[in-house]
Each structure stands twice: as C-alpha cells, then as structure tokens.
Image (cartoon, rainbow, N blue to C red):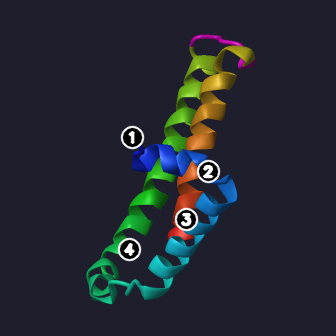
C-alpha cells in the first residue's frame, strides 16, 4: 500500500526543495502586511528606548560601585571582582546596543 509519505520519500530531494521554495515565494508575495498595528506600536517605542538606556546605566553603575566597594573596603584583588565587573559592563553594553537598534 502506497502512502503519501513513502511516495514523498522516493522523490528526489531537489523536487521537494523546489516545491518548498515555490510555496515560500508564493506565500511571501501574496501576504499583506498588517499596517494597522504600526500605529499602536509607534508611541511605545520611545518609552522602551528610554527604559533600555536607564537599564544600561543602572547595570554599569551598580557593577562599578560593587567592584569599588570590594576593592576599597574588603581589600579584594582585581582578579576577584573582574568577572562581575565585565559581566555588568557586557549587560550594560547589550542594552545600549538594543536601544540603538530601536532608536
């Protein structure tokens, strides 16, 4: 008994790839974008941009103050606090980069 799966498995791979490509092109060219929702998103974007910038500033400030506290008060070495400092710096830079992509 032949099923659709066994028939599809016997066909060459290029036919399946061509079929998927044709279906993808047809779907991409006939789809209509949802322009109505853009008006709802536009006022929110400046607020998200501001939140991301504030988040980056707070990440960097907290990690900088924590590293300074550990070094100055608890006499820690830079090698003890470097991984935390670099992690905060990386998180702060990532949120600034995200804000740049939005803005």
Quadrant containing the N terminus is top left
Spatial distance from mark 3 to mark 4, Cα to Cα? 36 Å
- Which quarter of the picture shows residue 40? bottom left
Q: Is residue 15 above or below residue 3?
A: below
> Is there any visible trace of residue 100 in the rendered image?
no
The chief SS type of the magenta part is loop
* The magenta stretch spans residue 65: no
Q: Secondary structure at mark 3?
A: helix
Spatial distance from mark 4 to mark 1, Cα to Cα? 58 Å
* Residue under pointer 2: 93
* Residue under pointer 4: 45
Q: Residues within 10 Å of mark 4 (few under 14, many from 20)?
A: some
Q: Secondary structure at mark 4?
A: helix
Comparing labels 3 and 4, the label whose residue is closer to the camera: 3
**83 vs 37, nearest the viewer:** 37
* Residue under pointer 3: 20
Spatial distance from mark 2 to mark 1, Cα to Cα? 61 Å
Residue 50 spot, x, y in % from top left? 41, 66
**78 vs 26, nearest the viewer:** 26
Q: Is residue 57 left or right of residue 71?
A: left
Q: Is residue 87 above or below residue 28?
A: above
| Label whose residue precedes the other's in the sequence (2 or 3) | 3
Residues marked 3 and 4 touching at CB (< 8 Å): no
Q: Residues within 10 Å of mark 3 (few under 14, many from 20)?
A: few
* Residue under pointer 1: 1
Please give the name of the residue rendered at 50% of the width and 42% of the height, measured from the top-left corner. Answer: 59
| Label whose residue precedes the other's in the sequence (4 or 1) | 1
| Label whose residue precedes the other's in the sequence (2 or 1) | 1
Please give the name of the residue rendered at 48% of the width and 43% of the height, measured from the top-left corner. Answer: 6
Comparing labels 3 and 1, the label whose residue is closer to the camera: 1
> Is there any visible trace of residue 17 in the rendered image?
yes
Q: Which mark is residue 77?
A: none
């Amino acid at each position: 008994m032949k099923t659709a799966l066994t028939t599809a498995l016997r066909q060459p791979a290029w036919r399946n790839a061509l079929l998927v490509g044709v279906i993808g092109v047809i779907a991409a060219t006939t789809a209509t974008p949802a322009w109505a929702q853009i008006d709802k998103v536009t006022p929110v974007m400046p607020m998200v941009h501001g939140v991301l910038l504030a988040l980056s500033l707070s990440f960097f400030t907290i990690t900088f103050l924590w590293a300074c506290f550990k070094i100055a008060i608890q006499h820690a070495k830079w090698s003890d606090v470097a991984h935390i400092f670099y992690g905060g710096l990386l998180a702060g830079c990532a949120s600034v980069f995200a804000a740049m992509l939005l803005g």
